[in-house]
Image (cartoon, rainbow, N blue to C red):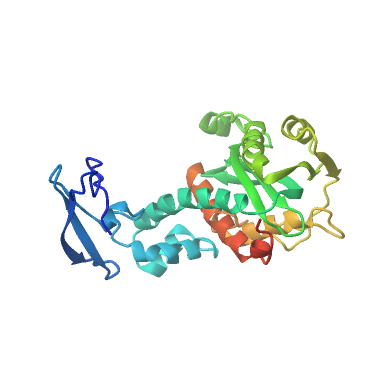
Amino acid sequence: MRRDCPHCNAKAKTSDDRIQVIRDGSFWRKSDGRLIIKFKCRACGKHFSHATFAKEYRQKKRHKNERIKNLLGERCSIRGIARIERLSRTTVLRKLKFLGPIALVELQEMNHARKPITRLQFDDQETAEQSKYKPLAISLAVEEGSRWIAGFEVSEMPVKWKMSPRKRALYGNRKDMRAEGRRLLFARIKLFLDPKVTIISDQHPHYPKSIREHFPLATHVRHKSRRPIDHGQDELKQGFDPMFSLNHTCAKNRDRVARLTRKSWCLSKKKEHLVYHLAIAFVRHNKSLPCNESQRK
């Protein structure tokens, strides 16, 4: 199969049936042992191959991508994956930056392929970057019953306790960006929800305003927060839990994503790395649900 030239956009075949792109040998790729066909463009004289059009172009360890993606969703840290796969931490981090944006797009496509959600549970999950004095809020939207993750957004939040003058001088005052994060999340998942969706949340005082702004026809049901049980990463609640789908998903996230696990050495150094890691883990989570095939349009 001939390809158009990526350098000068010359067509493989012109209107007068002249061939502009010709084959120019082949080579065996070292990383996965595949035979790659090379081409030459007669118009500009430059060379390219089938590998030029791949997302993994110029990657020397592309055969590690799927393995690293699976390990990121199974409570493995960046350093742990580097030790297991005998790679440098820099290589694993580059894989995270490569796989993360792809997972974000895939999460959107998976939501487009499903039926509109009629009952949604929503709440914020807290974590931090670099230090507990730099907290982050993960706004998470989960379908009730199926535990399908419809979307998420990571935003900055202020410290909830009083800081000493020394810590305040070191870390400064953080802005509360949770309202902006909810706005971005609702704007993103609005296409996947039924206009008359039922949104279930706790009694957070700022939730009703954000929900009315983006979902004027929605029904907002609020439940009082319950005390967490000892196990379940402090996410599962005592007794009957009307928000079990969301809380169970949050507990699973803390158990499966190393940087969310409580009382551990793992911590996000950058906010964007947390976003990429969550996207990879959430795509893996949605694919493992039994409703993945039954809820297709």
Displayed quadrant of residue 91: bottom left
Pick whichever, 238 or 72, lies toward us.
72
Residue 171 seen anywhere in this rendered image of the structure: yes
The location of residue 46, given as percent across then percent down, is 15, 47
Residue 293's place in the image compared with 21, above or below, is below
The location of residue 18, given as percent across then percent down, is 18, 48
Q: Residue at x 71, y 44 (%)?
A: 193
Pick whichever, 19 or 25, lies toward us.
19
* Quadrant of the rendering where the C terminus is positioned: bottom right
Q: Residue at x 80, y 35 (%)?
A: 217
The location of residue 153, given as percent across then percent down, is 60, 42
The location of residue 93, given as percent across then percent down, is 40, 53
The number of callouts visible is 0
Q: Residue at x 67, y 38 (%)?
A: 186
Residue 264's place in the image compared with 197, above or below, is below
Residue 270 seen anywhere in this rendered image of the structure: no
Q: Is residue 44 left or right of residue 33?
A: left
Pick whichever, 172 or 256, lies toward us.
256
* Quadrant of the rendering where the N terminus is positioned: bottom left
Residue 24's place in the image compared with 188, above or below, is below
